[in-house]
Image: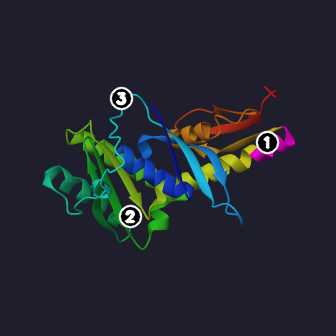
Amino acid sequence: MVYEYEAKTEKEAIEKAAVELGLERDQFDVEILETQKNSLFKKGFVKIRVHVEDGVKVISNSSYPQTKRTADPVPQGEFEEKLITFIKDIVEKMGYDVKVDVMFREEKKIGIKMESSSSSILIGRKGKNLDALQLLLNVYAGKLGHEDVRVILDTENYRIRREESLVRLAYTTADKVRSNKNSILLEPMNPFERRLIHTTLNDIPDVETKSEGDGLYKQVRVFYKGLY
């Protein structure tokens, strides 16, 4: 399913899409269609296209309440309490202070937020520490009998900031590739980040992308058409 949204900034357009579709940000891919900077005679805007995979339940309603994306931060029930205790114990055993709350709740999905004076360390280089902690949390959820629940772990709004930086990286890389008519191999990324790069550059006519390497953290090569 494909939807289009327009706002003053890329961030506002993405937030608008999430609210109107009733989805979390990691449930859809974003493609930048058009960007207009502020000028003397025109106001700036950004137009995006949102791609939602089949099977994802969409609540398409422009009056969808903003409060849908918030939640009581206090854990509700034994499962949530165990998740909070598990990640808190791990971080504290690593030697860092942390406060852990529920960020949001959805059907088959829960967001957990960490607050710490050592957030940069918990995030790690390119978010690898945060990804590792999230993986442990999801494995633990499975051991508690909730294999069907996806746990999202975040701190300092890192995940949305990372996505915005990757979109900028994709366009900057595409410009370089088109200018030099060569290819550029990007840093290793997890599957979600790679998909974001592929989707962002999908409609640029003279640029293509492909993943290279093995394992979870593969690299995306951006290349000028005709090189391969």
Give whichever of discs 2 and 1 has the lower sequence position: 2
Query: Relative to 137, does residue 44 appear above or below in the rendering?
Result: below
Characterize the local packing of mark 1: few (<14), some (14-19) or many (20 or more) Cα atoms within 10 angstroms: many
**Magenta-highlighted residues:** 175-181
Identify the residue at image location x=66%, y=54%: 36
- The residue most toward the right is 180
- Tell me the quarter of the picture where residue 150 sits: top left
Of 11 and 180, the residue lying toward us: 11
Q: Amino acid at mark 3?
A: Gly
Instruction: Check contact, mark 2 vs mark 1: CB within 8 A.
Output: no
Residue 94 - label: 2
Label 2 CA crowd tier, 10 Å (few <14, some 14–19, many 20+): few
Question: Residue 198 at what x, y percent from top left?
Answer: 61, 37
Residue 129 position in % (x across, y down): 47, 55
Whether residue 50 appears in this view of the structure is yes
Please identify the residue farthest to the left as the structure is shown: 77
Q: Residue 53: say if magenta.
A: no
Is 215 placed left or right of 139 in the picture?
Answer: right
Q: Position of residue 113 (x, y in %)?
A: 34, 60
